[in-house]
Amino acid sequence: TVCFAPIKKGAYAFDGGDTNDVPLEDNDVPPNTYQQTCELPSFEWAAYGTRLTGRMYTRRAALLGDKLFAAGYLKSTLAPNKEDFVESDADFGVTGPYTNTNPTGVGAFYVTSDLVSYTTEHGSFAQYEVGVVKIDATTGEPEDVYVYHGEGQDETCGLAAKEISDGKRLLAISGHFVGSLAVGHSDGTETTIYNSNAEGTADFVLHPNAIKNGQDDGFVISTDADTGDANWIIAYPTSTKDSQTVGVDLDSDGNIYGAGYACNEAVDATVVCNGFVAKFAAADGAIMWEKQYTDLGAAMWIAYDEMDDALYVTGTTTYKGEDSDSKIHQSCNHVTCAVTMRLSAIDGEMDWVRTVQGSPRWNFFDQTGDIRLANDLDGPYVYVALDDAGENGVVTLDEGTPYAGCLDENGVLTPEYEVNPNSVVTAADCPSGSTFVSRSDANAYPASNATTDAQCGAGADIVDACVIKYHKYTGLPIWGSDIHPVASIVPSSDGQSVMAVGFYYNSNSFDSVKLPSYNGIEAAYNAKLNAETGKGEYVMHSGGVGKTRPYDAVGSPNGDIYIVGYTQSSVLNWGGTLQTKIIEEGVDQNDDAGTAFQFGKVSSDTKEYQFFAVKLASGESAMPSCVESCSLVEGGMIADPVIKDGHCLIDNICYIEDSTAEIFGRPCLVCRTSESQTEWSYSDDVGQERCFINNVCYDKGDFYNYRKSRRENYDSDCQICDPPMDGFDWSLKLGFALNGTAEPPNDCKIARFEGVCFSGRNKVEVEDSRGTIRMDSLQIGDSVRVGDGKFAKIYSFGHRDTDAVVNYLQIETDKFKNPLEISHSHMLFVLRDGTVTESVPASTIKIGDMILTENSNTVAKVRNIKNVQRRGAYAPFTTSGDIIVNGLLASNYVSLMDEETTTGIPIVSMQWIAHTFKAPHRMLCSLNFAICENESYDNNGLSTWIAAPFHSGQWLVKQNTVLKFLGMTALVSVLLFVSMIETIVFSPVLLLSAIIAFGLLFINKFNHQKMNSKNIA
């Protein structure tokens, strides 16, 4: 029997921080992370692509001495099959440095490259080559562009650099290709490889992103880092569907290690993908060993550790990133898993495996994570970033292969991470009298018994990636930190932190810190995590109005970080410390002359996807320029800055008074220190000439646009920015209604009915304990405040529609804080000439008019009227025919006459006609209120009690004068009788008098008939 020794927390700081830390539950967001922002590093320089005739999707970076290398897919955008084709000998170019003293790069260094121009007949992706940009890491000056070309698409994804033991400086480059791929050597010769599906010929093989049914083979290139001359190229792995050598690294002998996948079509036409890791000889690329993993859908990133000749590799059990193709993995306890493993670099034998629930996938445009060795000052650790890890909630990191250990004479097994944390544990490390138990032994220490509390997935609702710290010799998880998808991680040179780099969309929360949305598209972030605890210390953001995607980052020995990617922003703000403008060759600067120091329009896109490389001098930090002083509070976790007068500090970036948020695509937001020094304020033209809707600024007259896909965009025909109507939501053009929740082009329909009612925002007073409530909370049966200070029951809603978008008049008075929102034709009671009370349509109200209040002896003076648009329409009917709304006396009814209350018949008002017309309904409700409580409404939200009469009344008032007079005379005659009946029914005295009179009349008639009978007799 074997007993397992409990983990000794804190013995080697494996617990990931304070012993009083409590594991997070799902969505339990730490309130004190990413806020140590008293001092932040500065971006020093940037280099950019500047030509319209070339495009580079940058994928990977490497640093070698004072040279920065950035690799990706590179192409000429010129195509011989296009009518306007003109050949160029400088298709692609890079300019730099862009600095604070030269933000537009005027007079900066530049390099260009003459690329082969391919046709687009097989799709634009078939034009890509393998490209590597070389930049002076100190100055930011571009020096060269290495190009490896061939027919068909060549995708670059892996890059590593190293000065090997004989002094040579090498690059390892990897990816996959179709067709052919050629490299040049220092002697002027070339080597060309061909896709295996072309049967060794130069026949063009289609790429799946160009046309269906393409096949890819992987490739690996060894090249001279100083010249770009290739040492060798091999095609590996080959496949019948898709394959790629994703990540690469080098050892001191120049051997290259690669990780990736190969997908092949089976006999039954299904596609099976397996991961692999392989070692390629320094001399010629010959395969020294290879390991195929049928339990992986793909292996991805790889890091070589020369200290003990080990490899660290990430992978996934699913190639597609979904359950349908996930493999069964012995160390995975879930349907899908992200995998991290340590192998021997000598023969590829497995040392340990750690798994976590997740479904990362390989895709060249995704952020697929990273794996990097910790600095020696940090300790024997490896950092891993995994996408879609813990995506469904909190999951433990204590999963994978068992631990080795030492079994003492009492049968107690001490796991290897407690025996010796500084090297791989062997039998020699076990105390005298104990026995070494290997990881493969049946009595090995289960991974789940470590109970480290390390986990991923606590932020599953808002983030779906995880950065993990493992002990490299044992695989013991130290901590997991949930974060947005990560493109790269860079452990710091001082061993105190790790920097995560990536891009984010609108989902932009780093725990409790929310980054700004850059025009609703991708922006860059760099987040510093504490190496001991994994907690976020700060997060910086960068970008412009076009997408900005970083794909890799590398660190220097002195702590600088270099980030590479591509952008579509002309003006880029890097972390608030460097703002630059790309001026593309051949593009007319419509907003400025394009001279140095002149930015002109900030919110402008580039015409082409442009390469970028940028240096973050993370070894040098300073307070933001607008901060006068700053202290750390809450135990040193949260910055408490004092901001200089005349400045704003918004999202950790400084702005002077009246600066706009134009770089975020929001020119209608401004820094207005009188309102806030830490948040944007609305500019004066919001509600006048601009709208601010869904975090975006729109000009008056702009229509709502719906982007269905990359190629399909639709403008609405009815949803429009109408600032005076509503400065913060889309307004509807008159005559239109929304078609449910449909998006353009199906969002609009012709309005059949304009609301005749109140908005739901209005307030009314009810007689019960609820007091004052919103109009949209009213129900049939409630008693509400009406005229003369009384309460009356609601027996019906003439109009009730929670979804209708209605135009209202918003009427402000001098007596009440809340303005009344009422439809144009709805009636209010006003005082004319100081003595006469009239019920008039709201549309006739003018500034200065006097509207009656709860007490008919008092009035409120109208001081402002404007149009607003609201969702929801409500018209409660009370037994009194009126209602107090926001303190004002309003009618229950509308006027069918646009400009007058009379009907053409003297002394008869629309208020009397409407209220009398509803008398039968009120009398029925008084007999059996249950009938009224179960009211129904038509498609327009009109009560079925009034729908037909209402539309009939609308028809009548549109007729000629004679017909209108005859119809109204007949109607008034009937209503006079109805009014008399209702007056009698609801007045006890009159009702009793009527009964007595009727009785006397009956008795009199009976006696008269009796006397007549006697006379006849």
Image (cartoon, rainbow, N blue to C red):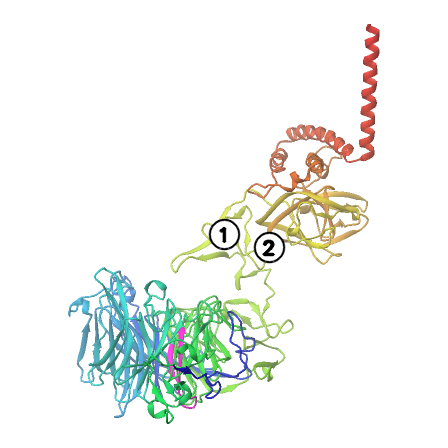
Asked which secondary structure carries label 1, the reply is: loop
Q: In the picture provided, is 189 more to the left or to the right than 772?
A: left
Q: Quadrant of the C terminus?
A: top right
The amino acid at mark 1 is: Thr
Out of 917 and 7, give the one closest to the viewer: 7
Across and down, in percent, residue 919 comes to: 71, 35
Q: Which mark is residue 725?
A: 2
Along the line of sight, which residue is nearer the eye, 596 or 141?
A: 141
Q: Position of residue 764 (x, y in %)?
A: 71, 52
Provide the residue designation for mark 1.
Answer: 741
Locate the N terminus by quadrant.
bottom left
Residue that protrudes farthest toward the bottom in the picture? 432
Q: Is 262 above or below relative to 350?
A: above
Residue 25, percent from left and from top? 51, 71
Crowd around label 1: few <14 · some 14–19 · many ≥20 (10 Å): few
Disc 2, SS = loop
Question: Would you place residue 839 above or below residue 232 in this image?
Answer: above
Q: Residue 148 falls in which quadrant of the image?
A: bottom left
Above or below 457: residue 820: above
The answer to whether residue 831 is magenta is no
Inspect the image, locate mark 2, and give the three-letter code of the amino acid beneath it. Met
Q: Is residue 614 visible?
A: no
Above-or-below relation of 841 to 471:
above
Question: In the visual, does 879 lie left or right of 375?
Answer: right
Residue stretch rendered in magenta on the structure: 370-386
